[in-house]
Image (spheres, rainbow, N blue to C red):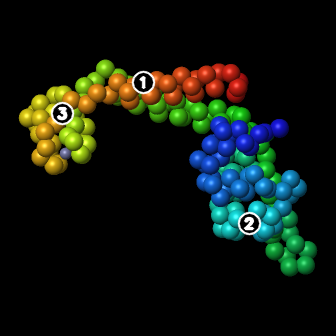
Amino acid sequence: MVDLNDPVIKGYFINLVGEEGFKVVDKMPESEVTDEKIAEATGVLLNIVRRTLFILYENRLAVYRRVRDTDSGWLTYLWRLDLSNLESQLLIESKKILKNLKSKLQFEDGKVFYTCKAECSRFLFETASDLLFICPVCGEDLEFQDNESVVKALNQRINKIEELTSSALV
Ligand SMILES: [Zn+2]
């Protein structure tokens, strides 16, 4: 069973489909249903329900079946959540985040940055020196900016995600 209250899982869905979309995931009926029925059951606007279903489908977390209404001849889509791929989707997502964090870390680590009081932009030492330590945007002095806390925070996030992906999601 998937625990939608698990902060990692809930965070993943909110990131993917938003707060309203999460309501759809959380309260979606178990049987096959139409988007209109889902909107009714969850209290979420129909266009948001449709958008959410489409995103879930693209991420292989929902499936649909098309049936033709015998009276009207219209095609109806019957939707169902399928969370059997959730763990692999979470893993793919974690790997993306991890890659992103690592490239940020690589950019920050061991470098010396300069910025003005308003933090208009950040410059490496060489650039700041070329600019005579004057911010080209606001004209204030560029001063050394300690990025040790940024590097530390990035390292912590990387370690945490590596821990999660190696234990819970294998
Ligand atoms: Zn500035």
Which picture quadrant has residue 83? top right
| Residue 159 or residue 32, whichever sits in front | 159
Q: Which mark is residue 92?
A: none
Residue 147 is situated, as x and y percent measured from the top left of the image, at: 32, 28
Secondary structure under tag 2 reads loop
Q: Distance between the Cα atoms at labels 2 and 1?
A: 43 Å
**Which quarter of the rendered picture does the C terminus lie within?**
top right
- Among the two numbered marks 1 and 3 on one chain, the one whose residue lies closer to the N terminus: 3
Q: Residues within 10 Å of mark 1 (few under 14, many from 20)?
A: few
Residue kind at label 2, given as amino acid type: Gly
| Label pair 1/3, CB-CB below 8 angstroms | no
Drawn side of residue 59 relative to residue 103, left or right = right
Residue kind at label 3, given as amino acid type: Glu
The verdict on label 1 being within 8 Å of ligand 1 is: no
Q: Residue at x 73, y 57 (%)?
A: 24
Residue 53 is situated, as x and y percent measured from the top left of the image, at: 70, 57
The residue beneath circle 2 is 43
State the residue lying farthest toward the bottom: 72
Q: Residues within 10 Å of mark 3 (few under 14, many from 20)?
A: some
Q: Which mark is residue 152?
A: 1
Report the number of numbered marks.
3
Which picture quadrant has residue 20? bottom right
Query: Can residue 101 be seen by looking at this rendering?
Result: yes
| Residue 124 or residue 135, whichever sits in front | 135
Q: Residue at x 85, y 65 (%)?
A: 67
The residue beneath circle 3 is 143
Task: Give the answer, above or below, for where 52 lies relative to 147.
Answer: below
Query: Can residue 77 be seen by looking at this rendering?
Result: no
Q: Residue at x 13, y 39 (%)?
A: 141
- Among the two numbered marks 3 and 2 on one chain, the one whose residue lies closer to the N terminus: 2
